[in-house]
Amino acid sequence: MQRCPNCGNDLAETSSAACPICGTVLGTTPGTMLGSKTAASPGAKLWIGALFQFAMATIFMVIFRFPKFMIVIFGVVIAVGTALSAWAKQRPLATPRASQQPVAHPTLLRVIGLGIALFSIAFLCFLLFGFVIFINNWNDWHRYQGQPYHVSTFQVTRTYFQRVGKGGIDAYASGMVDGNKEWMGLRPYLPTVPRSQEELDARVPAGTSIPIYLFPQMKGRSRVRMYDNTPTAEGYRRAAMNAVNYGLGGVALCATVIFLLTRLRRICFAATDSSIQQLAAFQGR
């Protein structure tokens, strides 16, 4: 006798493709119904969540002026992750052991769960900020690479304090270099960020002399760079390589810790009777 898998209605005398009582499509599992009773598939929910994540990430990167190509990269990453999750959910899943096993160490389980969450956040931070620092220094490295320059002195004429966006501060100055008026960003020169125009004037008064590199073929504030023992292009190259090394090292460390915590999580569950019987049968052999 054929019965509806959802409500148990006798379907022996019906020739329709759906149950007349609850609308379940014959040959499907409960929860897949017709009309208004059709349940949203897990895949659709995943893609809706992915769209929400992409929208939030796009708003965040636009507000903080991330490069536009990074929006495309994060969109691809989100799409690939969502596709893999949807594929994994469509596969038949075995009954998880953890859901059948009682928790033997609830405090340790909570601590391990918190550790996994924290290292997951750290993993994303290393990946995101490491990439941002790398790409910024990479662009500056190739922008100054091969450009002619010479060492000179920037004579400050006037300083400017400006608030940029939400909480951002820009400090720069106009001055004379080799008899010509130039502009220079003061953030690399100042050990800490000033909070007002008065503080900036006190720390960099008119007449201050700052050793610089002058790039005559470049424009704007990019023409003047603060003097350092390491040339400008080489300094940006080293910063980019350090971002790669530290970023990848942090990602690898977080991934290793997450893997170890996931394996350690198993000891928080007590053995069930079936597993004890299987162990006893194996030892009896």
Image (cartoon, rainbow, N blue to C red):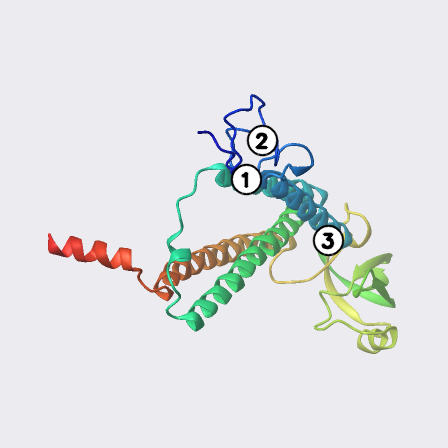
- Tell me which amino acid carries mark 3: Phe
On the picture, is 253 further left or further right than 186?
left
Residue sticking out furthest to the front: 13
The local crowd at label 2, few if under 14, some if 14 to 19, many if 20 or more residues have their Cα within 10 Å, is many
Q: Which residue is mark 3?
A: 60
At 39% from the left and 70% from the top, the residue drawn is 105
Disc 1 on helix, strand or loop?
A: loop
Disc 3 on helix, strand or loop?
A: helix
The image shows residue 257 at horizontal and vertical percentages of 43, 61
Using the rendered view, name the quadrant where residue 190 is placed.
bottom right
At 51% from the left and 38% from the top, the residue drawn is 8
Residue sticking out furthest to the left: 285
Q: Mark 3 to mark 2: distance in Å?
A: 48 Å
The local crowd at label 1, few if under 14, some if 14 to 19, many if 20 or more residues have their Cα within 10 Å, is few
Q: Is residue 260 above or below residue 18?
A: below
Q: Mark 3 to mark 1: distance in Å?
A: 47 Å
- Tell me which amino acid carries mark 2: Cys
Label 3 or label 1, whichever comes before in sequence order:
1
Q: Which mark, by number, is residue 7?
A: 1
Q: Which mark, by number, is residue 252?
A: none
Q: Which residue is mark 2?
A: 19
Q: Is residue 156 above or below residue 242?
A: below
Look at discs 3 and 1 and give the one toward the viewer: 1
